[in-house]
Image: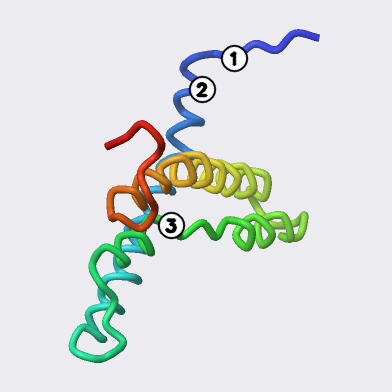
Amino acid sequence: MEITVRLDRFLFLFLVAVSPFFFVMMRRVFAVYPCCAIFAGSALRVEGKYQHVLFWGGLRGALALALAVGLPDWVAQRETIISVTFGVVAFSIFVQGVTMTPILRHFGEISPAKGDL
């Protein structure tokens, strides 16, 4: 069995999987920052660095993937919905997961790695 990947098809599928990620991130901007702004003058104020961590660290892909996989077979484009959802979740886990430690170090929430000053 041989698997062949055409570059033009890969780029298309990459864009199909990554483009929704940016829409998800924009939605998260409108969910995190305005909600935190509401409480800016109260005892429930969330500091800016924590707002950034909330924005970047929203790794909630399990629910989206479960909802996509749970779609009935008669739903049009069901396989495409599952594939795109999986792509967004995978991209989110890999990119956001790998970058979360450096972001927390940048904000001083965790100590620098050994050898870093």
For discs 2 and 3, the disc positioned in front in the rendered view: 3
Residue 20: % across, % down: 43, 48
Q: Quadrant of residue 27?
A: bottom left
Q: Quadrant of residue 112?
A: top left
Q: Quadrant of the C terminus?
A: top left
Name the residue that disc number 1 marks: 5
- Looking at the rendered structure, the secondary structure element under dot 2 is helix
Name the residue that disc number 2 marks: 10
Q: Which residue, as the protein is rendered here, is positioned at the far top?
A: 2
Name the residue that disc number 3 marks: 57
- Looking at the rendered structure, the secondary structure element under dot 3 is loop
Query: Alpha-carbon distance for marks 2 and 1?
Result: 7 Å
Q: Quadrant of the N terminus?
A: top right
N-terminal-most mark, 3 or 1: 1
The way the protein has been coloured in the rendering is: rainbow
Query: Alpha-carbon distance for marks 3 and 1?
Result: 32 Å
Task: Evaluate if marks 3 and 1 touch, with contact meaning CB atoms under 8 Å apart.
Answer: no
Three-letter amino acid code of the residue under disc 3: Gly
Query: Alpha-carbon distance for marks 2 and 3?
Result: 27 Å
Which residue: 26% across, 86% down? 39
Task: Evaluate if marks 2 and 1 touch, with contact meaning CB atoms under 8 Å apart.
Answer: yes
Which residue: 34% across, 48% down? 105
- Looking at the rendered structure, the secondary structure element under dot 1 is loop
Query: How busy is the neighbourhood of tag 2: few (under 14 within 10 Å), some, or many (20 plus)?
Result: few
Residue 59: % across, % down: 51, 56
Which residue: 47% across, 38% down? 16
